[in-house]
Image (spheres, rainbow, N blue to C red):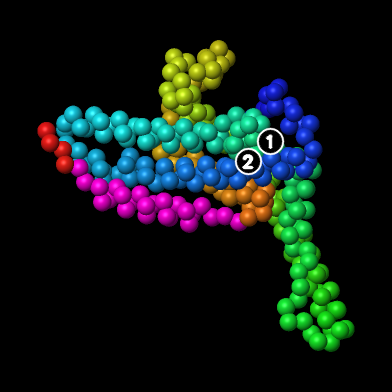
Amino acid sequence: MAMTDKDDKFKMMSVPERVQIAKEKTRRVVDHLHYLLELHENNAIVLYTRTLSQQIPTSFAANAFNVFQQGMHQFEIVRLCALWDSVKRDKENIPTIIELIDHPDVIDALAQETASHHIGGEVLNPSSDPELRALEEQAFQRANEQFGQEQARKARGDLRKAIDDSRAIIASTRLASIMNVRDKHLAHSLSQTWNEKERNENKVEPLPLMRYGDERDMLDATIPIVETLYCWVNGTSLSFEDSRDIDRKNAKALWEACTFTIRN
């Protein structure tokens, strides 16, 4: 995804500025992804199981239920697309974070920050002998420094992979198809999107239609990228799987206990 002219100022930022803004945006993206996971786990029941739909007979109520299902699904698509929207300084999304950190000096700064977390500290239960205590301290500091450098190397490799994986998603047909649905039918009411127009003018094969389940696959591909960014940009490990388990239990607690009585 190329930067727009208005975002050329990214190139003019100092490394500390880029790091600080990336940290802020990554924290916000984590929050946005948590909410998206909550939506997704509710939709996993509402849309993809018969837990509710089997309770709705052929009736006027079925029309309202269809609207409810579609609205839940469409809003999940909107929130997913927001995470992968275009690069811009005021946007809290993955492509903007990637644009901020995709620079050798920025990656090096994040790696060195990771290494610095392992400098210092004190030996637990040091020897009472001053000479032995000094040797213990030296060995402890060397071990910490070595571990810090190993973590720094891991940070560089993991960040590079997250950048490459993100750019692959940004360039993918699957994301383009999902974005096209968002742009054409949800964010706007268009007869033709710019993507469709451009493909038509260049006689390029039309985008494939988005299929049910594409949003799930895109979400699953998004999670490890955000976990990696949060780990090495913000210095904090995070597993969305724990939160996802809670979201799934919450959704089941509501929808599997929910019953409809429809009077025709």
Q: Amino acid at mark 2?
A: Lys
User: What is the x, y in percent for residue 204?
Assistant: 54, 19
The stretch of residues the image draws in magenta is 237-260
Could you say which is closer to the camera, residue 119 or residue 166?
119
Q: Is residue 114 left or right of residue 252?
A: right
**Disc 2 residue crowd, few under 14, some 14–19, many 20+, Cα 10 Å:** many
Kindly identify the residue that appears in the image at 37 percent across and 54 percent down: 249
Which SS does the magenta portion mostly show?
A: helix
Neighbours of disc 1 within 10 Å: few (<14), some (14-19), many (20+): many
Coordinates of residue 230 in the picture (x, y in percent): 62, 49
Rendered residue at 71%/43% (across/down): 20
Tell me residue 130's x, y (percent). 86, 84
Query: Please, what secondary structure does the residue beneath circle 2 have?
Result: helix
Left or right side of 263 for 137: right
Residue 25: which disc? 2
Along the polypeptide, which appears first: circle 2 or circle 1? 2
The answer to which quarter of the image holds residue 129 is bottom right
Q: Is residue 70 above or below residue 260?
A: above
Which residue is labeled 1 in the image?
99
Secondary structure at numbered mark 1: helix
Farthest-out residue, bottom: 129
Circle 1: residue type: Glu
Quadrant placement of the C terminus: top left
Q: Answer yes or no: do the residues labelled 2 and 1 have beta carbons within 8 Å?
A: no
Q: Out of 70 and 120, give the one closest to the viewer.
A: 120
In the image, taking residue 25 as reference, residue 192 lies left or right, namely: left
- Would residue 231 be counted in the magenta stretch? no
